[in-house]
Structures are given as structure tokens and as C-alpha cells.
Amino acid sequence: MGIDEKERERAILDVTAELLLRHGYNKVTMSDVADAVGLNRRLVYLLFPSKDALIKALLLRELNIYAEVWNRYLDSDPLGGTVASVYRGLLAALKQLPLMAAMYTRDEQTFGKYLSRPGNFFASWPPDPGPTREYLQAMQEIGVVRQDINTRAMAFILDALAPSILAALSSHTKAPLEDSNRPDQPSFDELVETVAGLCECLLTPKAGANLEAGKAMMRRKIEEAQAQLTERSNQ
């Protein structure tokens, strides 16, 4: 693929992301994309043979961007490698990437009928990097989580909190929370910091976490996820 073709592909994907977030899958057409990027529709079809092929390419790119943002956060956080840092980094990355947030929450307003399309991207992509209990057990084994923690119970608690966090995340991607209408609802940032604080207090060993081991594990998980994405993009 030549430089011009790569630039054209990037421009098409950028425009598609904007249109998808603004109008939703049901209303966006290939003609809309071609018009917005200033290309003949035939040129768009040469790169992406169908609307769903275009959406798949866009979502794969978004996941790669998400992994890169999360990786940078992991490196910049002084406490990177702890469970608290992982949650804070994951949610901070989602806040920066509205399309990824919509993917994570399977937002019907954004994806509409695509969610029920045979072979759609989400059919084989879980939003979670793995079962919470297995993740906590692995972190416990490398000295990032206290040895006396009941990982089964803690995983149940963290999973129970997820719907409230995702609801706040969904609200954030659409519009700021209306405090006047929901004075009892905390903001997305408040939830992120509170969950991270709970993880820090409850899970971090008193002598401190093995941060380098925690970072190494998360880097491996990110690399494995990116390798899977590369494999899927070539299918």
C-alpha cells in the first residue's frame, strides 16, 4: 500500500469514526463517508468492500489506539503495576477515546443494527481482558495483591461495581452528567478515583506492591491483545 493510499485509508477511518459517533451505524452510509472525505465512492469501496468491512477496520484500529494509550499511562503512573493503577488507567483511557467507550459499553445509539449483524466484530471480542478472579490471582502470585485477600469474593465485588461505572462512562460519552437532574449520582471521575482508592487500600500489600512485576504482566497482556488484533486484521 503506497503512502497516498495509507493516508486515504486513515482519512476514511477518521471520518467514519466522527460520523458513527454523531449519527450512529444505522444512518451512516458509504456515500456519507465518501462525501465527508471528499472522495469518489468507488475509491472508498476499493479499500473497504462493504460498510461492515469499514466498521471492522475502524474498530480494530481503535483497539490498537486504546492499547497504546493504556501502555503510556502504565509507564507514566508512579504506581503503575498495581490493581488500582490498572483500573484507573483503563478508565482514563476510555474517557479519552469516545469510540472505544462506546465499544466497551456496546452502545446501541452508536452501533444500532450492527450489534445483531451475523459475524459482527463484537461477537468474538469480549470487553474484559479476562475473568477478574483469574487476573487477581495472577497479581497475587507476583506480589501485587495481598496474600490474605479472598480473590473470589473481591472479583465478585469488583464485577458488581462494573455496571455503575459503565453507566457513568456511557453518560460521559454522550453528554456531561446533569447534576441538577441526578444530584445523587457521582461523576465518572469520582467513580474512577473511588474504585482505584478502594483497590489501593484493600489489595496492595502493606510492604508495597511489586510494581515492576505488575507492569511486566500488564505489558504482556497488552502485547498479547495487540498480537490477536493483528491476526484478526489479517483474516
Image (cartoon, rainbow, N blue to C red):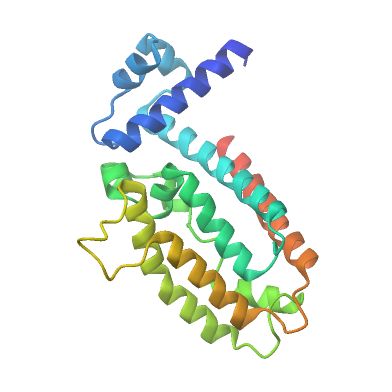
Left or right: residue 193 compared with residue 208: left
Q: How many marks?
A: 0
Left or right: residue 141 compared with residue 67: right
Quadrant placement of the C terminus: top right
Whether residue 27 is visible here, answered yes or no, is: yes
**Where residue 4 appears, x then y in whole percent?**
58, 11
Left or right: residue 15 compared with residue 76: left
Left or right: residue 14 compared with residue 33: right
State the residue at coordinates (78%, 66%): 213
**Where residue 91 appears, x then y in whole percent?**
50, 57
Residue 144, compared with residue 181, is above or below; it is below
Closer-to-camera residue (36/193)? 193
Closer-to-camera residue (229/99)? 99
Whether residue 235 is visible here, answered yes or no, is: no
**Where residue 189 appears, x then y in whole percent?**
45, 60
Residue 165, compared with residue 49, is above or below; it is below
State the residue at coordinates (58%, 57%): 89
Question: Going by the picture, which residue comes out furthest to the top?
Answer: 40
Question: Going by the picture, which residue comes out furthest to the front?
Answer: 180
Closer-to-camera residue (110/193)? 193
**Where residue 148 appears, x then y in whole percent?**
67, 91
State the residue at coordinates (41%, 52%): 123
Quadrant placement of the N terminus: top right
Question: Going by the picture, which residue comes out furthest to the bottom?
Answer: 148
Residue 37, compared with residue 135, is above or below; it is above
State the residue at coordinates (35%, 17%): 36
Question: Going by the picture, which residue comes out furthest to the left?
Answer: 181
